[in-house]
Amino acid sequence: MELGSILEFLENRSILVTGATGFLAKSTVSLSLSLQPNVKKLYLLLRASDTNSAMLRFNTEIIGKDLFRVLKEKYGGDNNYYFNSFISEKIRVVAGDITRHHLGIINDDNNLLQEMWHQIDVVVNLAATTNFDERYDVSLALNTLGAKRVFDFCKKCNRLKVFLHVSTAYVSGEKEGLILERPYKMGETLNGTRGLDIDEENQLVDATLTHLNQNNYSQEHIKSSMKDLGIQRARKYGWPNTYVFTKAMGEMLLGQLVKEDQTVPLVIIRPTIVTSTYREPFPGWVEGLRTIDSLAVGYGKGKITCFLGDPKSIVDVIPADMVVNAMIVAMVAHADQRYNNKDNIIYHVGSSVSNPIEFKCLQDYGIRYFAKKPWIDKNGNPVIVGHVTVLTSMATFQRYMTLRYFLPLKGLEIANTVCCKYFQAVYLELSRKIKFVMRLVELYAPYLFFKGFYDDTNAEKLRTAANESGIENETNIFYFDAKIINWDDYFTNTHIPGIVKHVFKNN
């Protein structure tokens, strides 16, 4: 693998980014413009019905975010005119939908589609739904069939250098031990169950929706049924939830398409749990709740009295800017490389092999941070936190729930029959909380007791190639080596403060 200058590669390139309002997508846009202002054009695909709606989303959900503060200072200073001029020159906002033909892009009077097909050099597919228990029809359309739509679009781009598809390391399901950077074959399952067929899964979704609609079920019932169907289908073939199941099928579909049509150079990036930025554009920027951050928010606000998980299990986390840097370096390394069955084009971007961190450390960081800097609630009072009960197995969790919730609930249920008006509200609220907690545990337990380690041999080769390129300073610019992270310093001085600043107020 030989790399030239990454900055020179990005110069005068046109790049399509799908799912542009997502956490990683915004980071990709910000870093690309910051590091290489001479990029020709960034086409940002936003899910919207028309250009006006897309522009509204762009202004509120992308450019209006604090993430772009550094970019504004760099290219505009105190003058918004210069920054807006720079953005309008470098970014083309495109209304579309990856579940539709031609990505839902309307071929208007400006011949936008033809322009994109003739100009685009790189396609970065970040469009996805990451909800673990998303409706199966929605998740299948976006994460699986949407990947095919993007591939079909790539085939029409006559200047295409590379198609970079962002998946997730957790397509591995609940595998233990060293998990290799290898592709999935079409129809492959994690538990050996035969019969997985993507076309048949799509037909099942259509048939189920038809049945539900014909029988006049409520939209709430249809939503619940489609969520349950996704979990059922995922677990039938060995995956723990709908998200990773549909992402795995998306990889299968892309692998099959590339074998059939070798005109599209494909690279698949599998990040682990993505956390706040390590360095660029500034430390600690984060948006939305990542898996582990739900625990931090709940604990800091005094809503969590116990943690569930194996204290010795490894939690694989990686900062967002490192993921984006790995994406950029990978696209340069594989530009113009057509598919070869012997080549492995998958990269794990994580930390569990190179710089592992145990689950108990995350607990300790949260306790230490919020003991010193408690969250101030809406009434202006500090939320005092302390050590929490650590449940190290599902068996201890069941006992805890029985003593703390199920027995009181049973008592309320009996009392409810005697004095309905007095106990009904309390009974219903406690019942709702129990169902919510049990659903979360059902979805997240596989990751709280995870026994896998993500091999990053290919990613290490990519880092080595970047180091050996001889391009001055580019290794420091496009860093993605987890070994440089001091986890204690990162979590206590960067990540948790970032969550408090950017996430707490909205949750």
Image (cartoon, rainbow, N blue to C red):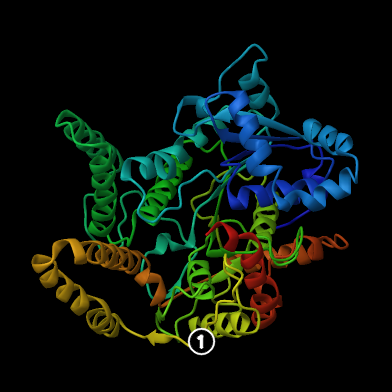
10 Å neighbourhood of mark 1: few (<14), some, or many (≥20)?
Answer: few
Residue picked out by circle 1: 386
Residue placed most toward the observer, 316 or 78: 78
Q: Residue furthest top?
A: 109
Residue placed most toward the observer, 32 or 392: 392
User: Which residue is drawn at the image coordinates 45% and 46% (left, top)?
Assistant: 255
Q: Give the quarter of the image for residue 281.
A: bottom right
What percent of the width, then of the height, locates residue 84? Answer: 82, 35
Q: Give the quarter of the image for residue 171.
A: bottom left
Residue 161 visible in the snapshot:
no
How many dots with numbers? 1
Residue placed most toward the observer, 4 or 122: 122
| Kind of element beneath mark 1 | loop
**265 left or right, relative to 453:** right
Q: Is residue 458 above or below residue 71?
A: below
Q: Is residue 394 above or below residue 230?
A: below
Label 1 amino acid? Gly
User: Which residue is drawn at the image coordinates 22% and 80% (left, top)?
Assistant: 402
Q: Is residue 117 above or below residue 147?
A: above
User: Which residue is drawn at the image coordinates 25% and 62% (left, top)?
Assistant: 425
Residue 84 visible in the snapshot:
yes
What percent of the width, then of the height, locates residue 309? Answer: 40, 80
What percent of the width, then of the height, locates residue 175? Answer: 37, 71
Q: Is residue 350 above or below residue 232?
A: below
**464 left or right, relative to 370:** right
